[in-house]
Amino acid sequence: MSVEESFARIAEQRDQLVRAALEHVAFDGWSKTTLRTAAGDLGWPEMEVDRLFPAGIGQVIEHFVALTDRDMMDRLAAMDIKSMKIRDRIGAAIRVRLDLVEPYKDAVRAAVAHLSLPQNLPKSLRMTAKTVDLMWQAAGDTSTDHNWYTKRGLLAGVYGSTLMYWLEDSSDGHKETWDFMNRRIGNVMMIPKVKSSLGKAGKVAETGFRVGRKIASCIPTPGRIARQFSGAR
């Protein structure tokens, strides 16, 4: 087996283990117990958990997010998304991503709680940035100037707030979430105005530091959740 084949096999096994674990996260959270139970479901020895995810639960959650990103892109690729208006493309990307994990809300909630810890902020920023970049790619965005950063920073806020609303939404078909999302997408549609106003004050940020600050504003923490959603529903 070549090195490439070996890496591909490990990636596939990680996918299998994470998918199997999703059935158990509601009971034992993202934990070694959950992963060992999932390994047993697959007929694997418990030692496979440490072999596939030597860095622990953080690595498992990061793989879960990346796996969902890939599933999102596959589903969006099968849709005629390019024929939609831009705001509908963004809405479709967010909705597809949340629909994919709708059966596993407890797993998402546990992942959010883990990523909200202060020591996990860099990882949260990186993962959020990757997800919203993929959404814009699926929407057909080809910008390469400072607009690239502005769009992703704003979408991070829309996606992050919609995710938090969705986690607490019990309305039929998550109707309240989609109404909330559509209102927030209005912010993204104001990009030209934002660009113009920033242009008067000087160049908009084109550095990872400022992008990080923008994305950090959507990272869900208990304080932000309470401030942002108290009385919002």
Image (cartoon, rainbow, N blue to C red):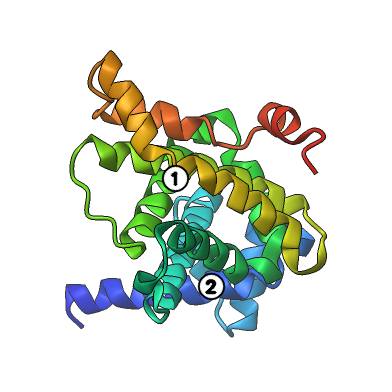
According to the image, label 1 marks what residue? 189
Q: Is residue 30 visible?
A: no
Q: Which residue is mark 2?
A: 17
Q: Is residue 64 visible?
A: yes
| Sequence order check, earlier mark of 1 and 2 | 2
Expressed as whole percent of the image width and height from the top left, the position of residue 10 reads 36, 72
Indicate the position of residue 189 as horizontal and vertical percent values. Answer: 44, 45
Q: Quadrant of residue 82?
A: bottom left
Residue drawn at the location 63% of the way across and 58% of the way down? 32
Q: Secondary structure at mark 1?
A: loop
The residue that appears at 64% across and 56% down in the rendered structure is 108
Horizontally, residue 70 falls left or right of residue 186, namely left
Q: Position of residue 24 (x, y in %)?
A: 71, 69
Is 91 situated above or below 45? above
Q: Regarding mark 2 in the picture, which secondary structure is present there?
A: helix
Q: Quadrant of the N terminus?
A: bottom left
Q: Residues within 10 Å of mark 1 (few under 14, many from 20)?
A: some
Which residue type carries mark 1? Met
> Does 202 sit above or below residue 49?
above
